[in-house]
Every structure is written in structure tokens, then in C-alpha cells.
Image: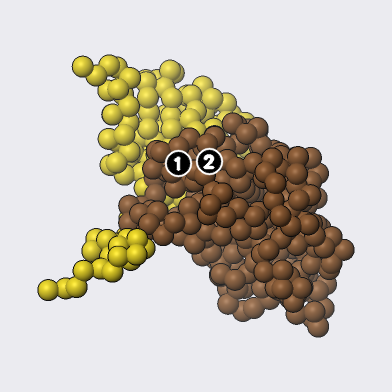
Amino acid sequence: MAGKIVSIHSFRGGTGKSNTTANLASQVAMTGKRVGVVDTDIQSPGIHVLFGLDEHKMGKTLNDYLHGKASIREVGYSVGDNKVEGEGRSQLAGKNLFLFPSSIKGKEISQILHEGVDFNKLNEGLQTAITEFNLDYLFIDTHPGLNEETLLSIATSDILIIILRPDNQDLQGTAVTVDVARSLDVPNLFLMVNKALPKYDFAEIKKDIEEQFQAIVTSVLPLSFDMAENASRDLFSLRYPDHEWSKALKNIVPHILNAK
Amino acid sequence: MPGLFDRLDKEIKDSQKDGGISPLDIAKLPPSLRKIMRVMLRELQLTYPRICEVMDAMPEQDRLTHAELDEALAALSEQFWLIRIGEKEKAIYKVNLRRRAGSTLMAGIWSSLDEKLKGNPPSKPK
């Protein structure tokens, strides 16, 4: 097997999953690796915004692929070859980063919800994206919660990163996801805590969660007003590399690169 | 007149419609079969000799004998969790994932939504 699949998941919405996925994928691409990002959150897609892709620029989508109207090769959008606005995003020029977006057209979203998803085709698309684009890493941005697309991405992933907030609802949901991931033999399971109040002791949060789940917490990222103010207009960790949030995010990169 | 490839393709598509495995079903399989399923998901299809290779590389406590493996593959194929193309040593296996069913909401809801999205108000109920 060639490239590795990295699934980014959270049990609940609002954990910063898409932002984390886009920033992590970009950081890995900045190391010279060939990286893909697939938006399997078909019912509420959004990661394309972080890469500066809007409805007018969006060509073929994962929806077209699933409906047999496009090949996966046609869906892949080269972020590095397209001029994008944003001080952070523009650093990706010339890098090998490919986005496989989901459609943001209401009609196409409703069509998928109505007709269902052919998982054989979806899985074939994921594996073909790796071979056709010669990817080292394929990041999958999933829909929050445990739905069938998410379970498929967990079942096929080499690395699973579960994002949670230090919140009891998140902790309970994460326990379920960790159980499922373990029963599917995911080789590398990591946790990432996001939106931790700066007044907390981050080392203590990391220790507590690692003990509770018997899994590595790669990083504890602070709740950041700067990040909120960025409002997905740019890739925060590239634009503000010395910010605490960015530094904590970059701590995850070696875990991905060194995973077997 | 359809050729051999068309007939095989139709046969596979028909059997895919009949069912399939969900990731939760995969989680419930014995460790050795789970491992094979995971490799198959990644490589899309495996030949019988390759499955034997994957099995032989497993820790001894998880390993199935070739007879047990044959029995397991036959059972999985019978349930349409695996699709087998060809026979015995020359067989190729593919995972058959269960399709996610569409919404069971009344079709009218979707057409109303589509009309709304097109900017046309849905027609009034009589």
C-alpha cells in the first residue's frame, strides 16, 4: 500500500475539525509531501472555503464522481497550481496539495441525501485518488458523529485523529469513537484537544485524557479569539506560524510523518 | 448482444445491490478476517494467493488454516459481503460495502426542497 489515509474526526460538531484538517494537511504539504484532502462531509461541506475555493471556481466535485459524471482525477483541484488570496494560503504555491471537494449546491446535496451513497464507489475513489495523484497522505474530513461515511473512513484509515474539546459531552462521545476505532484495528489512534480555555493547565488536560482513553494526546490547542477572528478566511497556521494555536498544531505533524 | 465483460459487470452490480457489509459488521469479524477485510478495502481487491500471504503473515494465534480460510471466504461470499470472481486458486475477492440508503422521507419533501433551491416556491397543497 502506498500513501497513508489520515481521518480527522470528532463526535460532535464545532470542534474545529475542518480548520484542523486544512491546517494539518497544509503543514504536511509544506514538508514536501504529496497531500490530498477529501471532503466526505457531503451533507455539510465546508473545507474548500479554507483553501480559497468558492462555488464559481469549483469544477467537478465528489458528488459528480459518486454519480458517475466525473473521474476522481477530474475532481482533484490543485491548490498549489492555482493562485489564491491570503498570506497563509499563498505559501502553498507550487506545493503538491490536492483538494477533492464536495458540492455546495443545495440540489446536489439533497440528491445525495435522497439517493444514498454507494460506499463501494466512495472507497474506490479514495484509494484511486492515492494512486492517481501519487499521494503520500490523504486527509479525510468527515461529518461529525458516527455515521456510515465516517465509519468507512475509520475502517480504511492508517491514522485516526479524534478532536475533542475538554467538555463532558465531547469526552463521552469520544469514548464511543475510540471503542469503534479499536474494534476496527486502526493502526495509529491519536487524540487532539481543541478550544481549551487558556486558564487550564494544558499538561494536566493531556495527562487526564491520555489516562482516560489510553491513547496519545498529540496536542492541546487553546481556545483562540484570533482564530475565531480569522473566520476561515485564511490558513491560520501558515499566516500566523508563531501563534500558540499554530505551534500546538504543528506538534501533531511529526506524529503523522512518523506513524507506521 | 452483450459480451462476457458486460455480463460479468452486470452480475457483480446485481449482487452488490443484494446487500453488503457495513464497517460495523467488519468490526465484529474475527481478527484475522478483519485484517483481510482492511487490506482488501485498501487494495480494492485481492487474489486468493495474496489473501493466503496476508493470513500467513499474521501472528500465530490469529492465523486460520487454509481450510478454515476457505470456509470463511465461502461464508462471506455467500452473504455477499465479499464478491468472488473466478474459482479456487484463481479467484479474486472484493469487499462489497453496503450502500447507504437514501432518506426515507417522502419524496415530495425533496422535490419541494429542489424547487425552493431553484427559486420556485413549492406548489400549494390542494
Q: Which of A193 and B6 is in front in this view?
A: B6
Q: Are marks 2 and 1 in contact (CB under 8 Å)?
A: yes
Q: Nearer the viewer, residue A106 or A259?
A: A106
Which residue is the site of mark 1?
A65
User: Dot 2 lies on which element?
Assistant: helix
Hey, which residue is sitting farthest right in the picture? A242
Categorize mark 1 by other alpha carbons within 10 Å: few (<14), some (14-19), many (20+): some
Residue at 40% from the left image edge and 53% from the top image edge: A108
The number of discs equals 2
Residue A8 appearing in the image = no
The hue used for chain B is yellow
Residue A166's spot in the image, x, y percent?
A: 68, 76
Chain identity for the colour brown used in the image: A
Which quadrant, please, contains the N terminus of chain A?
top right
Vertical relation: B23 (above or below) A203: above
Which residue is the site of mark 2?
A75
Residue B21's spot in the image, x, y percent?
A: 39, 45
Residue A38's spot in the image, x, y percent?
A: 57, 48
Vertical relation: A29 (above or below) A238: above
Residue A124's spot in the image, x, y percent?
A: 48, 37
Callout 2 and callout 1 share a chain: yes
- How far is the residue under mark 2 from the one under mark 1? 7 Å
For the residue marked with disc 2, what is the amino acid? Val
Q: Which chain contains the residue that carries disc 2? A: A
Q: Which chain contains the residue that carries disc 1? A: A
User: Dot 1 lies on which element?
Assistant: helix
